[in-house]
Each structure stands twice: as C-alpha cells, then as structure tokens.
Image (cartoon, rainbow, N blue to C red):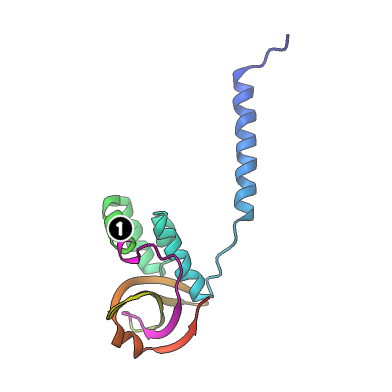
C-alpha cells in the first residue's frame, strides 16, 4: 500500500491552488487608465464589492498616500468614507456621460455622471496625472451646475 505523507499532500494542493489563481489573474483585463469612463466604472465596481484598497490605488499620488495612512491607522474611517459613497451610488455600476470640469485642485478634470434624480446629479470626479485618469472624489451636484459643464460624450 502506498503511503502519502500529509506534508506532500499540502504542498501539492498549494501548488495547484497557486497555478489556478495565476490563471485567473492572467485573464483579468487590465484597466485602461487613459479612458475616463473605464476608470469611473472601475471605481463603481470596486465600491460595490468594497475593494477600498483598489479605489485608493486609483487616486492621485498625494491623495493616495493620505488615504493609505488613514486606512493603516483607522480602517473604520475608510469604511465609513467609502460606505457613504456606496450608499449614494446605489446599485449603479456604470457611468452614462462625461463632461469637462475643473477639479477642486484647480486642474482640468472630468465629471462622470452616475445618476440624475430630480435636481441632483451624482458624479465621479476624475483628474489627470500624466497620461492616466485618477479618482479624485464623488459627489452630488445640482443639475443646473452639471448642465453648465462642457459635454464630452455619452458612455455606452
């Protein structure tokens, strides 16, 4: 009768698991950070599955470091901050429109529309660092303010 040692079974299982995971990760599409709609949609998807570390990675460098410090020191603050965003976004996982705007930091940016309810529009604010778009903020603005922004395109 063949004796199999538990250590060998454990090691073999680990190798199989790592191989399968590598295959899954290799097939995952890369995020095109030069596409503002793709970045905004990636933010919404991460928000819905509560992948807040991914959202932090979408931020501009200075903001990213600030949020990483908050997450390291008090993770419940990050959960509270992004939990409010998740509540505002509702079940929406896709943006529908892009408009030009100036970000809070005074740089050119994009407002990606998530939803409109009455006189309110929920948008994701994106800024640009080099050739990549970054998540800067998400907020509700008046529909009048939103209409005053320069239209770029509808998103399918």
Q: Quadrant of the N terminus?
A: top right
Residue 82 placement (x, y as % from top left): 32, 60
Residue 99 placement (x, y as % from top left): 42, 84
93 up-or-down from 148: above or below: above
Quadrant of the rendered structure where residue 144 is?
A: bottom left
Residue farthest to the front, as pictured: 118
Residue at figure coordinates x 30%, y 84% from the top left: 143
Total numbered labels placed on residues in the image: 1
Q: Is residue 153 magenta?
A: no
Disc 1 crowd rating (10 Å Cα; few below 14, some 14-19, many 20+) is: some
Residue farthest to the top, as pictured: 1
Residue 37 placement (x, y as % from top left): 49, 74
89 on left or right of 41: left
34 on left or right of 96: right
Closest to the observer: 122 or 79?
Answer: 122
Helix, strand, or loop for circle 1? helix
27 on left or right of 116: right
106 on left or right of 41: left
117 up-or-down from 148: above or below: above
> Which residue was labeled with disc 1?
83
86 up-or-down from 136: above or below: above
Residue 93 placement (x, y as % from top left): 44, 65
Residue at figure coordinates x 55%, y 65% from the top left: 31
Quadrant of the rendered structure where residue 88 is?
A: bottom left
**Magenta segment range?**
87-105
Q: Is residue 103 magenta?
A: yes
């Amino acid at each position: 009768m063949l004796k199999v040692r538990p250590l060998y079974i454990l090691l073999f299982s680990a190798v199989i698991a790592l191989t399968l995971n590598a295959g899954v990760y290799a097939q995952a599409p890369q995020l095109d950070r030069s596409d503002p709609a793709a970045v905004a949609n990636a933010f919404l998807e991460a928000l819905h599955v509560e992948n807040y570390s991914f959202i932090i990675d979408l931020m501009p460098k200075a903001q990213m470091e600030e949020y990483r410090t908050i997450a390291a020191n008090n993770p419940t603050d990050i959960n509270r901050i992004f939990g409010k965003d998740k509540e505002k976004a509702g079940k929406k996982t896709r943006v529908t429109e892009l408009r030009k705007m100036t970000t809070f930091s005074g740089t050119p940016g994009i407002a990606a529309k998530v939803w409109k309810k009455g006189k309110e529009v929920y948008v994701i604010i994106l800024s640009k660092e080099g050739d990549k778009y970054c998540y800067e903020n998400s907020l509700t603005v008046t529909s009048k303010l939103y209409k005053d922004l320069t239209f770029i395109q509808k998103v399918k």
